[in-house]
Amino acid sequence: MAYETIKIEIADRRATLTFNRPKVANSMNLLMMEELADCLEFLRDNPEVQILVIKGEGNIFSAGGDIKMMVTSGDPKDFESIMNYISRMVLALYQLPMITIAQIRGAAAGLGFSLALGCDVIVAEENSKLAMNFIGIGLIPDGAGHFFMKERVGTPKAKQLIWAGDIMNPEEAYRLGLIDYHVDEGEAESFVDQLVGKFLSSPILAMLETKEILHGEKMMELTNILKREASGQVKMRKTEDHLEGIKAFIEKRAQQFKGK
């Protein structure tokens, strides 16, 4: 399958999905979201694949949504398409009949971090920076960030982390339970390869049955959260605080939020 913004490789029961916009920190524009939705839906219906590794090209996982796209996507239809693609890719990722591994190097922020949290196993290198930082531009998490954060750390802590929007190093994220392994810089690929080998030599069909049972019980909640995130994001994009957050980001200055 040929894509412009991502790469997919399949061999020996393993698929590797790579975000491929390294010149813009693997940020996700509308095309990339569409391609991710299509690719994950294709994988969902491919029974030959039992492991999926998600990573970023170059020295970064993903900086999240493309800020330039946010500035230029004033048309409500564009924003509707964005949220539709996000919902499609999250639902497909969560329902994949395979073990999913996020292999993080560099930054995993915003929507990029949401997708990483949606994986079964998260491995981050020591140089990584992890952030659910939507709050910095006056938005709420999307990509089921609310759902995945709550699943990992519980509701009270999820709220606090989302509200703070802090950049975390892997040690902090590991202590909180947001990631599963942190490894030395440059070691993520070999570590993930070992994990893949271990999973593929295990009774993986039984493991996947467990995943299907546990995830199946959460599907209604996940679907509802995606809908509420979409409607909430529409409201937030109309606020003065969001416009200030975007302007401050572009101008590389501190935000001056007013609660409006």
Image: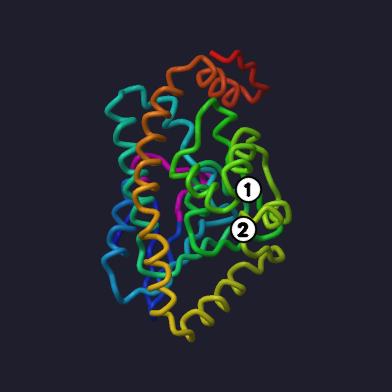
Q: Does 181 sit above or below residue 26?
A: below
- Residue appearing at x 31%, y 23% in the figure: 75
Classify the position of the N terminus by image quarter: bottom left
Q: Does 160 sit above or below residue 232?
A: below
Magenta-drawn stretch contains 29: yes
Q: Position of residue 82 (x, y in %)?
A: 34, 37
Q: CA distance from mark 2 to mark 1?
A: 10 Å
Magenta stretch, residue numbers: 19-33
Q: The disc labelled 1 sits on which kind of residue? A: Leu
- Residue appearing at x 34%, y 49% in the figure: 220
In this figure, which residue is indicated by the disc labeled 1?
Answer: 130
* In this view, the mark in front (2 or 1): 2
Q: Position of residue 34 (x, y in %)?
A: 31, 46
- Residue appearing at x 26%, y 66% in the figure: 45
Magenta-drawn stretch contains 48: no
Q: Which mark is residue 57?
A: none
Q: Position of residue 175 (x, y in %)?
A: 71, 56
Q: The disc labelled 2 sits on which kind of residue? A: Ile
Write down the quadrant of residue 257 in the picture: top right
Write down the quadrant of residue 205 in the picture: bottom left
SS of the residue under disc 1: strand
Viewer-nearest residue: 169 or 99: 99
For the residues bearing labels 2 and 1, Cβ distance under 8 angstroms: yes
Q: Is residue 159 left or right of residue 80?
A: right
Of label 2 and label 1, which has the lower sequence position? Answer: 1
In this figure, which residue is indicated by the disc labeled 2?
Answer: 179
